[in-house]
Amino acid sequence: MLWVEYLPLDEREASYLFQVVSRRYEQGSIITTSNKAFTDWGNVLGQDNTIASALLDRLLHHSVVFNIQGERYRLREKRASMTQEVGMGQS
């Protein structure tokens, strides 16, 4: 599984990631999760839009994309616990 998140990769790390995806491309499945839009991947991948475009080209070629929107899981849990604490404090 591949995560593309908020911490940017340097040029070398982005190159390594591209090499891994390129070698796996059309050989088997790759599951990817990200909290970034595809348009933001260049910023995460060593500030390199070219490598981001090439990587996305390979990832999206035979892909099924699930775009999950909604409240973040941890935030939802925190709000629920805060609501319970407030409710208990009003007794």
Image: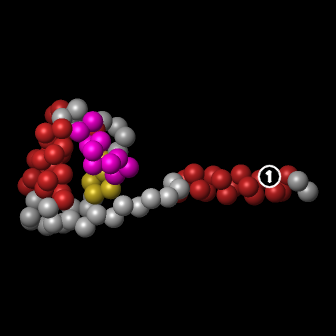
Give, as a three-letter code, the residue at label 1. Answer: Val
Q: Which residue is mark 1?
A: 86
Residues in magenta, as a range: 34-43
Residue 62: % across, % down:
15, 66
Residue 15 in sight in this render: no
Place residue 32 in its image quadrant: bottom left
Crowding near the residue tagged with mark 1, few <14, some 14–19, many ≥20 C-alpha atoms within 10 Å: few
Residue 90: % across, % down:
88, 53
Q: How is the image coloured?
A: secondary structure
Task: Give SS at disc 1.
Answer: helix
Q: Is residue 41 magenta?
A: yes
Residue 39: % across, % down:
27, 44
Residue 31 in sight in this render: yes
- Residue drawn where x is 18% and y is 35% of the image: 48
- Residue drawn where x is 18% and y is 38% of the image: 49
**Hey, which residue is sitting farthest right in the picture?**
91
